Amino acid sequence: MKRIGIMTSGGDAPGMNVAIRAVARKALSAGLEAYGINYGFAGLVAGDIHEFKATDLDDMVSQGGTMLYSARYPEFAQEESQLKGIEQLKKFGIDALVVIGGDGSYHGALRLTEHGYNAIGLPGTIDNDIPFTDFTIGFDTALNTAVDAIDKIRDTAKSHQRVFAVQVMGRKAADIALWAGVASGADAIIAPGFDYDVEAIANKLKKNRANGKDYGIIVIAEGDANSDAAPEFVEKLKQYGDFDARATVIGHVQRGGVPSAKDRVLASKMGAYAVELLLEGKGGLAIGILDNKVQAHNMLDLFDAKHQADDSLFQLNEDLSF
Ligand code: F6P
């Protein structure tokens, strides 16, 4: 093996640049060459590929987003696109790849492995929704962004005795909502997988008011990327009492920003490990961190598995919020 290709795919996440740097630097220090592929699988098919020099990567530890750009490219599920991608790998002399993205991106990586080009997947998504890893690259930074925003909202909520329904990202996953809810002392968390009752939440807020806490914070997961989850909740809440309620959708600010130190270390460990596996001639594997140990799992097993959020956080929040 002489040349490793690196790409980011799917939604961007803070720490992707750190992972790119780790893969490229580890490859260079092992005497290999590293090539960046722009725009994920779309760029692979188009041949939008360039060589990395060590100096290209200097300040990448502190840069959000992805210097390789990202794209969702469902067309790569088709054999025709895969063959075009392989033509480009041949043209640029790339022998193996690291794909940084969500589990959707892993399908493309597995197809390339099946075609004889070992590919390793790194979990890069703010949603933390990938099986066989406790944390994904970007989750910690996005979580801190959400908590920072909720802390600021609390200031204005208190000043005006208002209830705020704050919607966080996460697609179908509950992780950002659960962690941000506990971290920001929310009065309630609404997230996929957990039943809730608007009237019960209204009663809790009324009880809080009677006890002297005259504002409220409800953290709501977007669910299936529902941009109206928080506004809809506010309308329903108002049917159960005289609430001065507002909805805030934090949105894509959660996808940007300087990666946290935790995400940087995670991305560095995972990126370096991916190159070690490629050097051992392995492919079709997804990197994760379980119990603080970086490890690899077969992508096929991962597709059959389901991500499990830390359910205990929901009850913890119920116990602590009154
Ligand atoms: O997967 C990351 C994520 O930010 C989700 O939390 C969100 O549902 C989705 O991407 C938004 O996608 P887009 O940037 O395409 O609107």
Image (cartoon, helix red, strand yellow):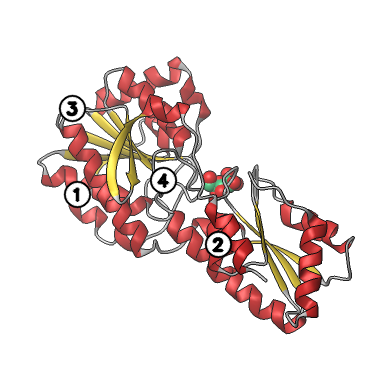
Labels 2 and 3: the sequence-earlier one: 2
Q: Are marks 3 and 1 in contact (CB under 8 Å)?
A: no
Residue type highlighted by circle 2:
Ala
The residue wearing badge 2 is 180
Q: Are marks 2 and 1 in contact (CB under 8 Å)?
A: no
Compared across the picture, whether 232 is left or right of 153 comes to right
Disc on res. 165: none
For marks 3 and 1, give the one nearer the viewer: 3
Question: Which corner quadrant holds the C terminus?
Answer: bottom right
Q: Is residue 224 above or below residue 191?
A: above
For marks 4 and 2, give the one nearer the viewer: 2
Residue at 45% from the left image edge and 43% from the top image edge: 70
Disc on res. 281: 3
Horizontal and vertical percent position of residue 259? 39, 61
Rendered image quadrant of residue 84: top left
For label 3, the SS is loop
Compared across the picture, whether 208 is left or right of 166 comes to right
Disc on res. 25: 1
Horizontal and vertical percent position of residue 53? 20, 49
The residue wearing badge 4 is 124
Rendered image quadrant of residue 318: bottom right
